[in-house]
Amino acid sequence: MLVLALHISAKTTFSQENQTDSGLYYQPFPELLNTIVIEEIVSNNAATLEHKSSDNLDNILERSPNITMIKRGGYAFEPIVNGLRGGQATITIDGMRMFGACTDKMDPVTSYVTSNNLSEVEIGHGAGVTKYGSNLNAGLNLSTAKAQFSDSLKTQGVLNFGLGSAAREYNAGFNVNVGSRNWAVKLNGTKRKANSYRAGNGKQIDFTQYQKENIGTNLRFKAGKKTILEAKYIYDNAFDIGYAALPMDVSSAESNIAQLSAHFYALLPIVEKVTISGYANRINHVMDDTKRPPEMVTMHMDMPGSSETKGLFTNISLQPNEKNSIEFRADYYHNYLFAEMIMYPENAPSMYMVTWPGINRNSFGFFGAYTKNFARGIDFNASFRYDVTNTQLLDSTGMKQLQVFNWGDEIYFEHRPISGQVELGKKWSKKLSCTIGSGYAERVPTASEMYGYYLFNPLDGYDYVGTPDIKKERAWNVSSSSEYSNHKTRINVTGNYQYIQDFIYGVIESSLWQMTIDANGTKLYTNIEFAHLVSLNGNWTNQWTKKIRTNISATYLHGTKHNGLPLPQIAPLTSTINIEYLHNGWQFQLDVNSALAQNRIDTEFIELPSQGWAVTNVRLAKTVLLKKERKLSIQTGIENLFDNAYYQHLDWAKIQRPGINFYGAVNYSF
Ligand SMILES: [Cu+2]
């Protein structure tokens, strides 16, 4: 399988029911990637009711068995794909590269969009996963919703409003599409406000509040029979964001994302589609501790950061015949990261430090993928990627800071990561299919791993310093998946093993003093010899009767370092059970989500064990058809029904999750 997709909120907006380029007057060939996406949606009977209308993207992603989330507050969870994180997994928006502007990982790329901007999320591994960038066999691409054409001038839209009790939160949004034969415009907006939520024991978890405003637009124009021009823009502004697990909050995290693309269909008989695209995005992240009570703040400080990325790519899909397809992609991006820290000690002059010293990165990449369908149900997929990435420091204060470590000359490095993956699939019968795959991947160190300067990590209480000449991580992987399905049942099992050499890990450097007052010491990003990572996932969906369907899934991750100690921050065995019941147009659903305790902890990292937990949710939904294709859908439910006080292993500082939450949402489609 090339790329797996999690189809989000399939029923929330009109645009998400019809995501292909169906507005064209000719039938375009499906893109290599989309084919898989559509197949996966058809075969994946994931319970639809779970996707509450206008649900928060973090909640949607967290339901995927391939994703675990690091939680630091009530907002901007950091997604981990099959145990891979940071620079190991690429996160892109329509293939655009984007890098968070926070040295403390408070703002993953996923925090700059809403589910209202998106049509689907591709969760990738195996052949094809490096399409958007070098990674260790893990990628997440967020596909934005496209404006839909229409044979006659037509306006459609959705208005939604929702409330939740645990955080006394509300969200409101709209999504409007105006389509004609040759042009289409889509506009969406979301406003969300959450207060600090109440945990299971009734205790309010301070500093988990946030507010978010987002607008997005997509314009498409048919410039001739085989050409579509597309423009998109997303503005996202989150403010007053609490990070209960960190010593600081974010007063504002603002991003602008813009992309212009031209899509050419069927240029030549074998050239199915060519896309040329240019994009730019900019993030401003303002981190401070002004809202914390004085007793929590040892020394007041400000830590603003910014990230700017500009890029170009071209994608060429070839289909020489029905049995073969080929895809090429060439891309370039430039990213600039700058972050500083201003400390205000009492009765002393303020101090200044550059934590991301003007880090410039240029990267040129080339990707190729080949798919062949042999006789007797055998498929072959292969992909290849090569990048030339250079990283350079430009800030003079940053260069002086490096001299402290005698690294004054180490301001320019080039990395050339290479990766290749092959996959063989066999359909044994209509019901049973299997794939096996193997590959090699390299990834460049992140800006923080090279040039981060005293970045405080409250999880282990250490300041982290980058190592400019740190080496690439290199990984060998083998993976396998099997699926059995008939008209009633679908069983899917996947396994993935990675042997990662030169694994990047923070190692305590006792000769260095910490900068942060309360820190335990300083760690240097270092290549350790190797690490093993295993991920296993099983999923069983069964349609018992016309009215009753169940879905059970379980995920297990196991990570070990060269010295036999576990890798830190690995989720324990996690499972979900959903039971769905349909009656008279009403949908009823019961979820039980749970995890075992995690006692496989990395004592070297100073990680703490965590307890097991189980949470039950009940949900109810009904859609009423009104006149003139109008629809009203109502969703309501209770999450954490038994008001359990619990936290998950990856939640920082063991901050408890929300307690009982009554929610309700109304969607009006016209
Ligand atoms: Cu931050």
Image: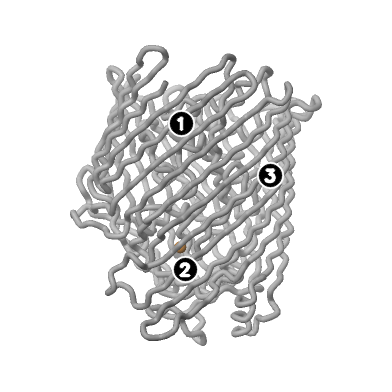
Q: Nearer the viewer, residue 670 or 32?
A: 670
The residue at 74%/58% (across/down) is 388
Q: Nearer the viewer, residue 466 or 4?
A: 466
The colouring scheme, among rainbow, by chain, secondary structure or one colour, is one colour
Q: Amino acid at mark 3?
A: Gly
Name the residue tied to disc 3: 278
Residue at the extreme right of the image, as rendered: 268
The residue at 40%/59% (across/down) is 251
The residue at 57%/14% (across/down) is 152
| Image label count | 3
Q: Nearer the viewer, residue 218 or 479?
A: 218
Name the residue tied to disc 2: 303
What is the secondary structure assignment of the residue under circle 2? Answer: strand
Q: Amino acid at mark 1?
A: Asn
The residue at 68%/23% (across/down) is 28
The yes-or-no answer for disc 2 within 8 Å of ligand 1 is yes
Contact between marks 1 and 3 (CB within 8 A): the answer is no
Residue 584 shows in this picture: yes
First-in-chain label (3 vs 2): 3
Q: Relative to 121, is 63 on the left or the right?
A: left
Name the residue tied to disc 1: 175
* Coordinates of residue 528 in the picture (x, y in percent): 57, 71
First-in-chain label (2 vs 1): 1
